[in-house]
Amino acid sequence: MKILLESQQQQNERITVALEKLAASGSQVRHGNVSDFRRLHPAIFTGEKSHLDAEQWLIDTENLLVAARVSEADQVDVVKIQLLRVTHTWWLAEESFVETRLLGDIFGSILGQVLF
């Protein structure tokens, strides 16, 4: 538990530094990218730890996405590179299912407009 708290503290310090740099730059706001996200040293998720560790990883990752200014449209693409082993395999299956379901919904909607 102590290690988890120290890890969380280090993550919070990196986020704070990143936010301070962004605020100090005073330049136009731009959306972040994979490089911006990776500079914050996000944790890799393998799915091999407890549910609490998974929840903490998700919270930390969401905070890093905000600190890196990654747009909502790009967040999934940026985060999926942090998934390894079981979680990477799971995501590939989910992504395929979601794309198929969305395409089916779109096709059904278009077909409904044509027929009715």
Image (cartoon, rainbow, N blue to C red):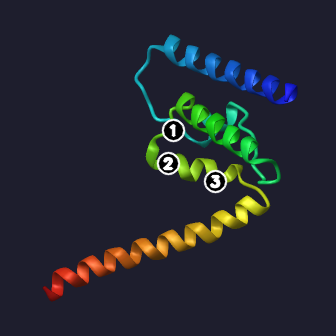
In-image side of 67 versus 3 (left or right): left
- Label 3 close to label 2 by CB (< 8 Å): no
Q: Secondary structure at mark 2?
A: helix
Q: Identify the amino acid type marked 2.
A: Asp
Q: Position of residue 20 (x, y in %)?
A: 57, 14
Residue name at image x 55 percent, y 51 percent = 76
Q: Neighbour class for label 1 at 10 Å: few (<14), some, many (≥20)?
A: many
Residue on which disc 3 sits: 80
**For marks 3 and 2 on the same chain, the one whose residue lies earlier in the sequence:** 2
Residue name at image x 79 percent, y 47 percent = 50
Q: Identify the amino acid type marked 3.
A: Lys
- Label 2 close to label 1 by CB (< 8 Å): yes
Q: Foreground residue, 26 or 42?
A: 42
Q: Neighbour class for label 2 at 10 Å: few (<14), some, many (≥20)?
A: some
Q: Foreground residue, 38 or 55?
A: 55
In-image side of 78 versus 44 (left or right): left
Q: Foreground residue, 81 or 48?
A: 48
Q: Which mark is residue 74?
A: 2
Residue name at image x 17 percent, y 85 percent = 114
Question: Image height check: is 17 above or below 113?
Answer: above
Residue on which disc 1 sits: 70
